[in-house]
Every structure is written in C-alpha cells, then in structure tokens.
Amino acid sequence: MNVVFLNPSYPPEMVEFTRGLTEVGATVLGVGDSPAESLDPRLKGYLSHYLQVPRLLDEDDLVERVTRWLAGKPIDRVESTWEPLVVAAARLRENLGCPGMSVDTVNGFRDKEIMKARVAAAGLRVPRSAGCKSAEHVRKAAAQIGYPLIVKPIAGAGSADTYRVDSPQRLEEVIGLTGHVAEVSVEEFIEGEEFTFDCICVDGQPVFANVAQYIPKPLQQRTHEWISPIIITVRDMYGDKYRAGVELGLGVLKAMGMGDGFTHMEWFLKPDGEVVFGEIGCRPGGARLVDQMNLTCDVDLFREWARAVCWKSFEAPTDRKYNVAIIFKRAQGEGHITARHGLAEYMSKYHAAICAEELLPVGARRRNWKNTLVSDGYILVRHPDWDAALGLAKAAATDITLTASR
C-alpha cells in the first residue's frame, strides 16, 4: 500500500496521521514545503520518501510537480487531512488513477455554496445564503436575507474572517474587513447552541462517530479576547438532545457523496428544537479535537483513520466512556508570558481528571489569539458525568489566568 500524504509536518497533528499510516502497513510518500532536514525526527522515521515543493498552496504547481515526481511509481492512495489541500489531493487521485473521492465530490466539501445546495437538495434544513464576489452583491444578498446575518469566506476553515452583521452600517464595516477574500458567503444567522458531528467513514458509512459542543459558539469565541473557549465531547451522543443532529449528519453524509476518511460537520440546535446544518469538511476537526475523541473512547483514531482509508476497516472499540473538554487560554496583555495564576491550585484540586496541560510557560511569547484557537495553550480534562465535566471546564476557564507584558 503506497500512500502519498500531503503536508505531513503541518499542522502538528499531521505527524500522528503519518504515524497511523505507517502503523497499518502503508509506505508513506510525503509532500510538503519544509526542507527534509527540518522535519520532526519522528516524522523522518515514518516517511519512506519525501518531496519538498516551493509553494504548497499553489495547487496547479503542486499537482504538476507531484505527478512528475511519481511517474512510474505505483500509488494506491493520495490523502490529505488539512483543509487547504483536500482538493489538490482529489486532483492527484484523478491524475494517478487512484481510488477515492473525485474533485467534484470534494469541491462540495470545500465550497460552502455548493455544499449547502447539495444538502438542501436532499431536503435538509440549511441557512438561506448567497455566494458573493463583490461588495454590491454582498449588499443585495443582505437585503434579501435580512438581519442578523453572517459573512464568511466561501472556502474558509474555522471562524477566520467570519462576522455577524446586524445592520447596514455594520455590513459596510465587514465589507471592508473581508475585502481580501475572493468570495464570501452571506447567510442567515441561526440562533442556538452549536455542535459538531465528526465521523470516520468507510464507503460513506460512519464506522466511528462523535458529537461535541462549542461553549460559547465559535463566533463569540472569535469575537471576545477575554473568553476561554471550551469544546466538550458528548459521551451520550445518542441522547434525546442530540438525536436529531446525528440524524441530520447521517443525511448530510449521503447528500455529499462521502467516501472514506474523516468528516467534521457543524450544526445548530435552535431554542425551538429545530436542527440546522452549518457546514462540513472532508477532514478532521482541528484544535486537538482528534485527541479529545481518542480520550473519549480510549482509542487511537489517527491509526484507525489510516486503517479506514487504506484497508476500509476499523478495529478500535467505540464505547464512549467520558465527556472530554478542552479549554483554551488567552493571556491578558501583550508580549511575553509573565505569570500563570491559579494553575497549581487547579492541578492539585482536579488532578485525577486532567489529561494534559499544555499552557505556554513563563517567558514564552504569547500567540495571536485571532490566528489560532489554541491561543496560549490548553488544558484537557475528562469525566464520565456531563455536569461534572462541564464544571471542570468552566473552572479552568474562570480560575486560571495568564498574564503577559512587554
């Protein structure tokens, strides 16, 4: 089994996906823009071959160089679990005659307007929306959809360049803020709680599934620096509160023509109980969500993803043992971390429930919280009881603070 894996060194969890491929018996040919000598030492042990390209996100150049590099080599799979490269992987599959999802199928997971059209055609509830390539088109779409609404990149990931708009005046501000985005989606704002539906699929059928909740909603997390964002996996994902969302997710997978691999879907639960589709990608959720799912069931989904895409198999148990919360922290101030308050007390009080603590140390330069959800680090906790897990997460959000100064 010869597998081409695009960008095995970034984001950092790609090293684990590469490991998974190796552990299920694949020979891994990596492609990235980092020099071979700078790769993580572990990664070097997982790769049989490596091609450095000058411009990883120049899709045409990437596809041409990799196709030329692989001439005459038997290739069985081409994979990427990083959002910006999923279409390039599909193009390479078509060029090389490898099995896997086509460019047309993958475009549905990447282009939000195509995505919503395919989901709506299956009779599933989606927000009213329009794709817009000019300021005038944005204004017309806003007038038709009505306020409040959301403006976001049509091919974006996460909540980057995503804004809530409540008035024509705010719309003009957001038009200026998104001027660098080639095409945006203007869509109906859905009020309610926001969840994920995550799957590893074989031939479009989930062999593993997960539900997680964002607390608060991602747009609020991205808007207010003082917030410590929480994502918490739901142990009882088939309970009454979540059942309709899971059914929605299963319908979306069918509508999108999903094949083998990871998916990450977001959906809304309105106060009246209606569930509404948000968006879906044919890749795993970021910000350590795979780690959370691993801790939820005590499994290794990096390896099981690899088993699914290589051998159409899944061998791990799927018993859900815990609710697992990750709490991201943002330092107060700018510059370097000068103090971490409340951490020792929290670690002492809740040590039995803590799975990982990866906060920036004193002296480290704080990160730009607008560019990364991980921000200045995180704490992972778990508990079999939902209320207890949520309490642990909220305590970390409020009782631990980081300060920074220049």
Image (cartoon, grey):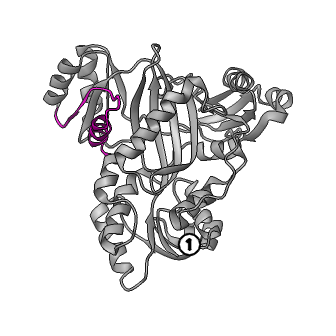
Q: Residue at x 32, y 53 (%)?
A: 105
Query: Which segment is the magenta one?
Result: 111-134
Residue 213 seen in the current view: yes
Which residue is rendered at x = 72% and y = 36% of the image? Answer: 322
State the quadrant of the C terminus: top right
Residue 234 against residue 157 in the figure, above or below:
above
Secondary element at tag 1 = helix
Q: Is residue 123 magenta?
A: yes
Q: In the image, is 152 to the left or to the right of 46? A: left
Q: Which residue is mark 1?
A: 37
Q: Looking at the image, is 103 positioned above or below residue 255?
A: below
Residue 130 spot, x, y in % from top left: 22, 31
Residue at x-position 47% and y-position 14%:
271
Residue 87: percent from the left, percent from the top?
34, 57
* Magenta stretch: includes residue 46: no
Residue shown at 56% from the left, 72% from the top: 37
Which of 119/144 is in front?
A: 119
Residue nearest the viewer, comparing 333 with 308: 308
Residue type at mark 1? Glu
Q: Is residue 320 above or below residue 240?
A: below
Q: Is residue 225 left or right of residue 236?
A: left
Crowding at dot 1, Cα within 10 Å, few <14 / some 14-19 / many 20+, comes out as few
Pick the front one: 91 or 288: 91
- Please state the horizontal and vertical placement of residue 205, each as a whole percent of the image: 49, 50
Q: Is residue 41 visible?
A: no
Image position, residue 200 (x, y; %)? 53, 51
